[in-house]
Amino acid sequence: MGKIWIEAAINGAWTRERQPAIPITKDEIIADGVACAKAGAAIIHLHAYDEATGRQKDSYEIYAPLIEGIRAQCDAIVYPTLPITGSGYAGELRSAQERYRHLEKLAQNGLAEWAVIDPGSAIFTRFDEVARGEAGYTYFNPDEHFYEGMRIASEYSVRPSYAIYEAGCLRLGAAKANTMPRVPVPVYRFMFADEFCFGFPPKEKYLDTLLALLSECDSGAPWMAAGLGVDIRPLIAPAVARGGHIRVGLEDRPWGVKETNRGLVEEAVTLIRAAGGEPAAPAEVRAGCAELDAKFRRGQLHK
């Protein structure tokens, strides 16, 4: 059994109105990221916020100090998000170039190892909204946006972290990666959900369905169990047993929980070890990814 990667998704785009415990200021985000890394998370995923408005703001000038601040205190793979266009509170639909501008500048300055590059759109409607007769929203991710992200990944050797909300996201992501041999092998992040209507609930039978599809489309690529509005704990032991990785954090938890990111990472470490796994250090994640890239270049990894 290989080492298990733990990713901590520390805030998300929800704002404190929806998830009160998330960090949003520079000092809070850096402190939370460092705490999660020291607790066992090799990967830190964050959203940048405008402190004056309390809303997500995806600018290089905000992201760079956050990434540098975490890296200055610990070793971790720290990577940014992109605007969740269509939501109203996390960014309106804009051009592909505008949406990925911060990522390209981070990559140019050596501050982007991984990146959110999502293949396909998804319906972000919650079951409580359905019950109240309210409409949710669509996370718009047009192909030209996905292709722009992949261009940056290819040019700067940034690893794509694919959010797999639906089966078609996996198929599109694998097909595009197969046409771009310079892009690092993507990480397929299976996005399960309890509170949202997209995708699958966090059950083993659905994990196996996604793994069967991944085997057909991009056999050998790394994957992790994650989600939104979800309790991912029931899938930690099954994911470890199947050679997968784990994402936890307040971005992914049901809204309003009274938890901490550090506590969620510590719990994940305990559950991974109980399942016979051992958390990976950042250097081990990088080494594993480099080995996969080398196998792909040698034609030993099917895409």
Image: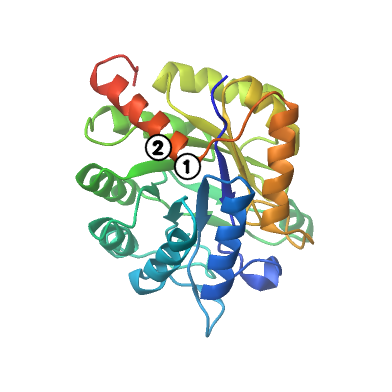
Q: Is residue 141 visible?
A: yes
Relative side of 235 to 220, left or right? right
Residue 199 sits in which quadrant? top right
- As drawn, 168 above or below 250: above
Mark 2 vs 1: CB contact within 8 A: yes
Q: Nearer the viewer, residue 80 or 262?
A: 262
At x 37% / y 71%, what residue is drawn? 59
**Which disc number belongs to residue 216?**
none
Q: Residues within 10 Å of mark 2 (few under 14, many from 20)?
A: some
Circle 2: element type: helix
Circle 1: element type: helix
The residue that disc 2 covers is: 286
Q: Position of residue 171 (x, y in %)?
A: 42, 29
**Three-letter residue code for mark 1:** Pro
Q: Is residue 119 visible?
A: no
- As drawn, 287 above or below 69: above
Q: Position of residue 235 (x, y in %)?
A: 70, 31
Q: Nearer the viewer, residue 281 or 95?
A: 281
Residue 103 sits in which quadrant? bottom left
Quadrant containing the C terminus in the rendered view: top left
Q: Position of residue 234 (x, y in %)?
A: 75, 33
- Residue farthest toward the front in the current orientation of the protein: 73
- As drawn, 45 above or below 67: above
**Three-letter residue code for mark 2:** Arg
- As drawn, 279 above or below 39: above
**Which disc number belongs to residue 282?**
1
At x 29% / y 63%, what residue is drawn? 101
At x 43% / y 42%, what residue is drawn? 161
Q: How many marks?
A: 2
Disc 2 from disc 1: Cα separation: 6 Å
